[in-house]
Image (spheres, rainbow, N blue to C red):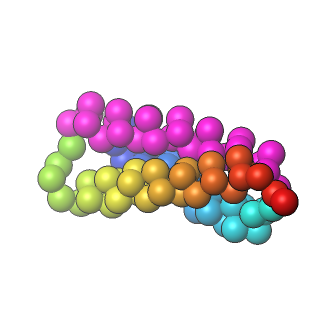
């Protein structure tokens, strides 16, 4: 289960970052992706802290992806809810 969720989050992270980068001015898309990213963050931390796993392997990468997703979500919320003058 741990490894499956890692790969799901990793693929989501790649798609999310690429799409976000090319659609910075699309506020609707940024808002949608930011809220999806919040769900991914909650699921990611729930899996990380709720499932038994080895100390090595992909564990540090799983935690890294979770924290980087937090930063990406903050950026997406900024671009999604900013006021354009």
- Residue 8 in percent (x, y) is at 51, 47
The residue lying at 56 percent from left, 44 percent from top is: 37
Q: In the rendered view, does 7 fall on the left or right side of 49? A: right
The residue lying at 62 percent from left, 39 percent from top is: 35
Instruction: Please tell me in which quadrant of the rendered image residue 21 appears.
Output: bottom right
Image quarter hosting the C terminus: bottom right
In the rendered image, the residue lying farthest to the front is 85
Q: In the rendered view, does 49 fall on the left or right side of 80? A: left
Front position in the image: 17 or 80: 80
In the rendered image, the residue lying farthest to the left is 55
Q: Residue 48 lies in magenta, yes or no?
A: yes
Total labels: the figure holds: 0
Residue 85 position (above or below residue 1): below
Residue 36 position (above or below residue 56): above
Image quarter hosting the N terminus: top left
Q: Residue 27 lies in magenta, yes or no?
A: yes
- Residue 54 in percent (x, y) is at 17, 49
- Residue 39 in percent (x, y) is at 53, 35
The residue lying at 18 percent from left, 58 percent from top is: 56
Which secondary structure dominates the residues rendered in magenta?
helix
- Residue 61 in percent (x, y) is at 33, 60
Question: Can you see residue 13?
Answer: no
Question: Can you see residue 74?
Answer: yes
Q: Which residues are magenta?
A: 26-52
């Amino acid at each position: 289960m741990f490894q499956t969720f890692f790969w799901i989050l990793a693929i989501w992270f790649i798609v999310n970052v690429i799409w976000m980068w090319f659609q910075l001015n699309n506020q609707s898309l940024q808002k949608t992706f930011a809220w999806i990213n919040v769900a991914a963050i909650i699921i990611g931390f729930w899996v990380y802290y709720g499932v038994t796993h080895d100390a090595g392997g992909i564990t540090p990468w799983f935690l890294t992806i979770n924290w980087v997703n937090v930063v990406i979500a903050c950026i997406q919320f900024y671009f999604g809810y900013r006021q354009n003058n």
